[in-house]
Image: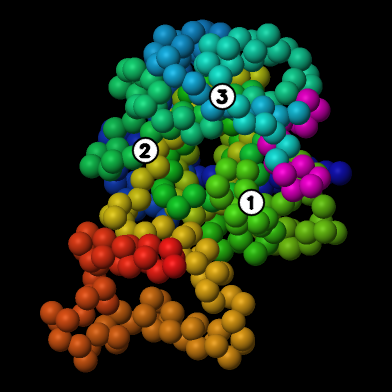
């Protein structure tokens, strides 16, 4: 079968002069973009250019003596961390010392069918001393979560994330295949509660797409973009854009930054989706139509209409939320859900 991704357009590339220039581009962007060499001067990237072992030694020099969570897949899986035939996971999640994990990676680095090993979304500040301070991007007044992802050749199914994302390849190479937010119907998402890593993922095998089982995936490909990144390169992924991620080298390290433009005290939209499934989806059709109308009125429609007739001081959570009113609403929901 011909590679369906070979002819896909590449993500646009931009140059940035400094942190202020990057800040402007991030604020103005409504689509992904690549910055070549953004983190090429990181000590971690420089260590990785010398050798994979050099990168591992550099990382180990900063680790804290705490257990790390690691995912270990099966040999012969082509690095795909996904579901098994029974819709469980085709990988095990264990706790281990980082030096032991790295030793196993080094011992099997040359093996063509080595089991994929993946340390995903490790908090850089919580698990390392000085690693973030020596290797970070100046993101201005944003307060991002800085995570490091380390592992062998892996394939991570297409998924999306609620925050904006700046993904920086420090060691190895990665390929991202990206889709706009509205392509979720064409990606054939799996369960939203039983997931490999907390987000619903595409059920399509990107290395062998089955267009008979997933015919609308062809439509998704019409909207796809690809970014192939070397060590030092960075990719901006807007909030909720879908992305399939491949680690292409025998050892890969990525550092990413997640941030939201909304206050931290606001709730998570995914929680609202779960609650709507619990409370609304299985109602009779006439009641569902009513609740759709209510959601349009209170959530998605004209924000002034529900409150125009209510005195300003009495609008409670119908007024723009504050940390205090959001806290009251959260407490109300917790009491309601605990009954």
Density class for disc 3 (Cα within 10 Å; few <14, some 14-19, many ≥20) is: few
User: Which residue position is annotated with label 1?
Assistant: 194
Residue 105 is situated, as x and y percent measured from the top left of the image, at 64, 15
- Element at badge 3? strand
The quadrant in which the N terminus is found is: top right
Residue 232 is situated, as x and y percent measured from the top left of the image, at 46, 25
**Residue drawn at the location 53% of the way across and 32% of the way down:** 120
Residue 330 is situated, as x and y percent measured from the top left of the image, at 33, 62
The quadrant in which the C terminus is found is: bottom left
User: Which residue position is annotated with label 3?
Assistant: 95
**Residue drawn at the location 44% of the way across and 79% of the way down:** 295
Residue depth check, mark 1 versus mark 2: number of the one nearer the observer: 1
Between discs 1 and 2, the one toward the N terminus:
2
Residue 216 is situated, as x and y percent measured from the top left of the image, at 73, 63
Between discs 2 and 3, the one toward the N terminus:
3
Image disc number at residue 185: none
Q: Is residue 98 magenta?
A: no
Measure the alpha-carbon separation of dots 1 and 2. 24 Å
Instruction: Kindly give the residue lying farthest to the front in the view shown.
Output: 339
User: Which residue position is annotated with label 2?
Assistant: 145
């Amino acid at each position: 079968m011909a590679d369906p991704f070979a002819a896909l357009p590449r993500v646009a590339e931009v140059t940035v002069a400094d942190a202020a220039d990057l800040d402007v581009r991030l604020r103005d962007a409504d689509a992904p973009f690549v910055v070549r060499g953004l983190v090429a001067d990181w000590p971690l990237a420089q260590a990785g250019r010398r050798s994979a072992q050099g990168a591992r030694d550099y990382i180990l020099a900063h680790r804290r003596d705490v257990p790390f969570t690691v995912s270990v897949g099966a040999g012969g899986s082509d690095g795909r961390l996904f579901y098994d035939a029974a819709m469980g996971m085709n990988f095990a999640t264990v706790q281990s010392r980082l030096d032991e994990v790295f030793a196993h990676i080094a011992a099997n680095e040359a093996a063509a069918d080595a089991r994929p090993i993946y340390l995903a979304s490790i908090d850089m500040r919580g698990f390392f001393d000085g690693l973030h301070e020596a290797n970070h991007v100046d993101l201005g007044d944003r307060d991002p979560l800085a995570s490091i992802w380390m592992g062998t050749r892996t394939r991570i199914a297409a998924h999306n994330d609620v925050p904006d994302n700046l993904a920086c390849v420090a060691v190895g190479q990665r390929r991202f295949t990206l889709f706009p937010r509205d392509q979720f119907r064409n990606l054939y998402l799996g369960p939203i509660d039983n997931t490999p890593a907390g987000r619903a993922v595409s059920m399509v095998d990107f290395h062998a797409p089955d267009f008979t089982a997933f015919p609308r995936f062809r439509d998704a490909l019409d909207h796809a973009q690809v970014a192939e990144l070397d060590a030092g390169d960075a990719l901006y992924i807007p909030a909720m854009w879908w992305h399939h991620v491949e680690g292409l080298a025998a050892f890969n390290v990525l550092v990413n930054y997640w941030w939201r433009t909304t206050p931290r005290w606001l709730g998570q939209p995914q929680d609202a989706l779960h609650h709507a499934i619990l409370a609304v989806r299985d109602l009779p059709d006439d009641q569902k139509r009513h609740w759709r109308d209510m959601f349009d009125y209170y959530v998605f429609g004209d924000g002034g209409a529900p409150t125009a007739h209510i005195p300003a001081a009495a609008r409670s959570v119908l007024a723009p939320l504050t940390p205090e009113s959001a806290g009251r609403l959260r407490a109300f929901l917790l009491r309601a859900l605990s009954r």
